[in-house]
Image (cartoon, helix red, strand yellow):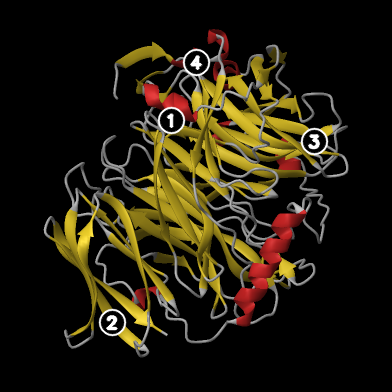
Amino acid sequence: MKTNIYLSLLLGFFVCTTFAQYPKAVLEPNASAKKDVTIHPKKSTIQSTLRSGEILAGQLPADWHTRLISFDKKHTLPPAVMAEKQRRTQEKLSRIHQDFPDENLLKEVTDQPTIGASFEGNYFDQTTPPDNSMAISNGGYIVSVTNSHVEYFNTSGSRLFTSSFDDFFGDPSFTALLYDPSVIYDSQADRFFMVVLHGSNSAISKVIVCFSKSNNPQDGWWYYKLTGDPLGANNWFDYPKIGFSTNEVYVTGNLFTNNDQFSQSVIYQITKSGGYAGNNLNWQYWYNISETPFTIVPASFGQQGAYGPGIYLVSNFASTGTSDKIRLFDLTNDISGNPQLDVYNIDANFSLAGDAPQLGTNIILDNGDNRIISAFYLNGILHFVFHSEYANNYNGLNYNRLTVSNLSNWNSKFGLDGYDYSYPSVASFGTSENDKSVMICFLRVSETIFPQVRVVYVNNAGEWSSSTLVKEGSTYVDVYASDGVARWGDYSGISRKHNASPPNVWLSGGFGAFRLNEHAFDTWIAQITGVAIGIEEQAIAPPVRIYPNPVYDLMNVEFTLDGRSPIEISVIDQQGKMVKMLLQDTAPGGRNCFSFNKGALARGIYFLKVSSSNNTIRYEKFIVQ
């Protein structure tokens, strides 16, 4: 997919940098069958916004750090979704017991993510949830944001700067809450791009877009105030997601009425050259995106460089909460190229799970819903993650690889019965554009552990490692709980350091900590240095996946065959003796799922043996409860 390497004067700056530009994928003719021809999104006229201000290095006023604390969520899920979620939570709580095994007892995998630098990041300052986001530049500067403040670090963990957002901007026109920050490193421009929201009603709603002056955030930022009510329909802007392409940056969000009813999602398409130079900002917005998508995620390029013109975006959650589909949005061109917004629907199958119990308290943590919250694009494939039910109303990680050319989606889940794996974020860990390996940061909790941060590796073949603990929680979280539920994520952060060799990524997440006399969340930042190097494209024995594990009733066995082949599946005990031949048959090529009831198996550890004439024999350990 690599085209040419070019040398140019980048975005009006006086330093020339050589970066790669990549084209978007070309859709095959049969992909048009999945195009939603009923959707006709509208775009605004091109807007031009003057620079609103400048953030100068080291010049901050006294830290007032104003804040308004709400004990309830700003928005509730649709009634049908809430009812289903509450039902599943009660089912989960009714079967809690103390002997759920931990993950390291279930997988004999040598590959595990390894941790390099590791240090405390943004601290709890009476604002919740954390809403972690972070990015790292090729120069080694880290920008870490939470719902209330911004901090800079170097790769040794030295804190270079900290400020509440009130005082970061020092703008007297910002009289409302500043919240929901999101930051990304634009490797094409070698700059940071950040968004912060202002206010929660239509009269004062602003989308504040910030462009760093260099790859060192200490050199300052330019910022612009865009309206949070673009349609003039008494709406305000929430849940921002951001991304970049070769020539543009993008901000998506959900619009709500002043009585907190969801209205619609919008996409802001912004020419980035003006922003990085501190000049006028040219932009337009997209609206009337039918089927009510809720939270649309732009997919930036996963390694060094960028792709374009335009960008891909992805969503899986409708405002009704009833649609199990993946929606691919193809923004076909830059503002200057008369773009269209084409929408494609891909069938999917995922479920809600209940909220999350935790050690030491009856307060449970809010698991939110199933919306996609992190994505990137690389070599024709859109990688994205969200959490969904893994087993018995516990959440697991749902990782997807969507091949754009033919709109086929591969997905795999990772989790453990008795534990909630939630709020994942994903970054490329490949050694080349052809290597599909990723690292996924996520949050984990159960009735036997405090909230913690973890990371897991998925190799080129789609096989999961065991996960690695990044930061153990030291307490439960009950800060500002309402009706027995406290906020949790709502995000984790992850960022690839593009000029590192071998690959490494940096991540941030919230862990349980006692601060300011509250059981709340602090942020932990860590470098993930590898599991060795990634895997180049090659023929690898397809994985076998069994779930749930431990098994209480029904177990599922997923396997992939190159073609129609004989298949044998049997249960083996710890002494190596066959307990039961479950299947001797011929299975079709492709992905298959076989299920069986544990039947007369006594509690204990067993092995599942899967063999085929065309595939390597695989053993998978499982536990019967």
Q: Is residue 511 above or below residue 425?
A: below
Q: Amino acid at mark 3?
A: Trp
| Image quadrant in which you'd find residue 532 | bottom left
Horizontally, residue 204 falls left or right of residue 449, namely: right
Q: Is residue 541 visible?
A: yes
Give coordinates of residue 292: x percent, y percent: 68, 36
Q: Earlier in the sequence, mark 2 or mark 3?
A: 3
Residue nearest the observer in this picture, 539 or 484 = 539
What residue is pinned by disc 1? 187
Asked if the residue under mark 4 is in contact with the one under mark 3, i.e. CB atoms within 8 Å, the reply is no
Q: Amino acid at mark 4?
A: Leu
What residue is pinned by disc 3? 236
What residue is pinned by disc 2? 606
**Spatial distance from mark 1 to mark 4, Cα to Cα?**
13 Å
- Residue at 82%, 36% (x, y): give it: 174
Horizontally, residue 126 falls left or right of residue 622, namely: right
